[in-house]
Amino acid sequence: MQTPENLAEILTLEPIEVNLFRGISPNDGFPRIFGGLVIAQALTAAYQTVPERVCHSLHAYFIRPGDVNAPVLYEVERARDGGTFTTRRVAAIQHGEQIFNLAASFQTPEVGLEHQFEAPNVPAPETLPTEAEYLRSLGDQIHPKMLAFMERPRPVDLRWIDPQNPVKPEKKSGEKQVWMRAVAPLGEDIRMQQAALAYASDMAFMESALRPHGLIWTTPGLQAASLDHAMWFHHPFDFNDWTLFSQDSPSASQGRGLVRGQMFSRDGRLVASVAQECLMRIRK
């Protein structure tokens, strides 16, 4: 039995056959599988065939909604094993159809030139409320069912710098920041650390494209979904500690929004970069 707060348990896969693995989605109240879970489990599946190298990038497409009541099969294709780089392709399958595919590249660690963006100057996570605490501060504005949903056990703790009021959303800049960390201990294995950060990278991300329009997930008539996802890992990190996810949205057009993000360790090191295009339509 998986514990909802334990990412290490949620991301553990069952080997079925050579290059074939099975993952389970915890029922977290959503009608479809959370995209970050499929990204993280697909990366975990790829890592089962790459024992020595470290992932430096992944690129993925969401093809069909995932069924939370069915397991996901992950089929790994060993595309290339080179002198320095290894490439893997992973197909996530449910009910005989692909719901998602991912390509990941792995590298033997090496020393090279370095530079990075500076981390934003934001309040420390300990000074910020949890999501549930923020909602409780809104008093009678919040429906008890929404509060109960936000207080459900989850594997990642989020602390927003400038949270959007879900009852009276305002038009705000697409630039936003949120602190995040794993709730349960992850251990030090870089493979699990990367999978956990990949999971979290799809949380609270699309909102950057919705905020300039005063929209939230629960806006009536809004159709929103992740279309693709890309991630680059720059340095080792510890997701047991707080990580700052700084985001912006440079564009929205033709029913799609683009969001970008940088993930900084608490000491200001840029550990990962993320990009995603999302579907965002208002049904009439």
Image (cartoon, helix red, strand yellow):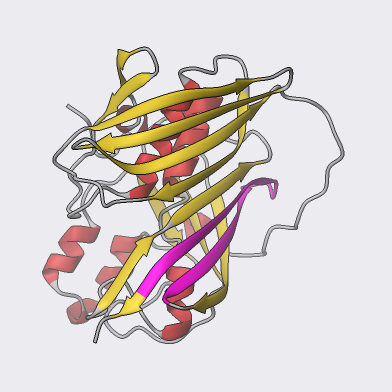
Which residue is at 47% across, 26% downward? 46
Residue 79 screen position, x and y as percent: 55, 25
Q: Position of residue 32 (x, y in %)?
A: 22, 52
Q: Is 75 rendered above or below residue 281? A: above
Which residue occupies the foreground of this view, 175 or 86?
A: 86
The verdict on residue 31 being magenta is: no
Which residue is rendered at x = 19% and y = 59% of the image?
149
Q: Secondary structure of the magenta portion, mostly?
A: strand
Q: Would you place residue 150 above or below residue 190 in this image? A: below
265 in the magenta segment: yes
Q: Quadrant of the C terminus?
A: bottom left
What segment is highlighted magenta in the picture? 255-280
Q: Is residue 240 visible?
A: no
Instruction: Give 94 or 179, whichever is nearer the viewer.
Output: 94
Quadrant into which the N terminus falls? top left
Q: Is residue 126 visible?
A: yes
Among all residues in the image, which is located at the extreme right? 113
